[in-house]
Image (cartoon, rainbow, N blue to C red):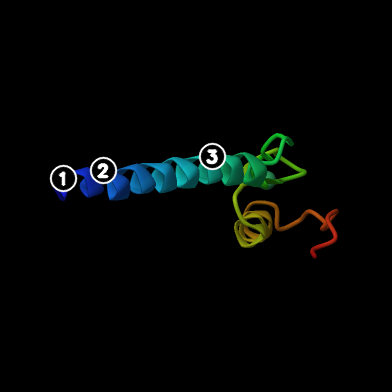
């Protein structure tokens, strides 16, 4: 006689899982902004157009490769 009751937890659990999945999809859709991803910041040498990932790398490159060049960039 107790087999009939065993379906209730399964149904409730299924509803909860379905609701959680819907909430998860909704939250994911809300979390994803419609704006395109920003490109990675690249520091470009104004003299030779070499690119560097960090300002420190660009400064090191500039001071070592172009020691006679004035600094056209205002270092932030
Ligand atoms: Zn350079």
Task: Pinpoint residue 49: horizontal percent, then vertical percent.
Answer: 70, 38
Residue bearing the label numbered 1: 3
Q: Is residue 29 above or below residue 76?
A: above
Pointer 3: residues within 10 angstroms few (<14), some, or many (20+)? Answer: few
Q: CA distance from mark 2 to mark 1?
A: 7 Å
Q: Secondary structure at mark 3?
A: helix
> In this image, 23 relative to 51: left or right?
left
How many neighbours does mark 1 have within 10 angstroms: few (below 14), some (14-19), or many (20 or more)? Answer: few
Separation of marks 2 and 3 at Cα, in angstroms: 27 Å
43 displayed left or right of 16: right
Residue at 63%, 47% in the rendered image:
31
Q: Cβ–Cβ below 8 Å for labels 2 and 1? A: yes
For image coordinates 83% across by 55% down, the residue present is 73
Would you identify the image quadrant in which residue 29 lies? top right
Say which quadrant the C terminus sits in. Answer: bottom right
Of the two numbered discs 3 and 1 on the same chain, state the one appearing first in sequence.
1
What is the x, y in percent for residue 36? 70, 34
Q: Nearer the viewer, residue 60 or 1?
A: 1
Which residue is rendered at x = 67% and y = 38% of the image?
A: 37
Residue at disc 3, CB closer than 8 Å to ligand 1: no
- What's the distance in space between the residues labelled 3 and 1, CA to CA? 34 Å
Say which mark, if any, is on residue 7.
2
In front of the other: label 2 or label 1?
A: 1
Residue under pointer 3: 25
Q: Which of these two is toward me, 48 or 74?
A: 74
Crowd tier of the residue under label 2, counting other residues whose Cα lies within 10 Å: few below 14, some 14–19, many 20 or above = few
């Amino acid at each position: 006689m107790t087999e009939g009751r065993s379906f209730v937890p399964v149904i409730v659990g299924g509803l909860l899982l379905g609701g959680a999945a819907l909430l998860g999809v909704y939250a994911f859709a809300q979390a994803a902004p419609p704006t395109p991803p920003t490109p990675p910041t690249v520091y470009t040498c104004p003299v030779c157009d070499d690119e560097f990932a960090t300002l420190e790398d660009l400064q090191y490159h500039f001071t070592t490769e172009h020691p006679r060049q004035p600094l056209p960039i205002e270092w932030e």
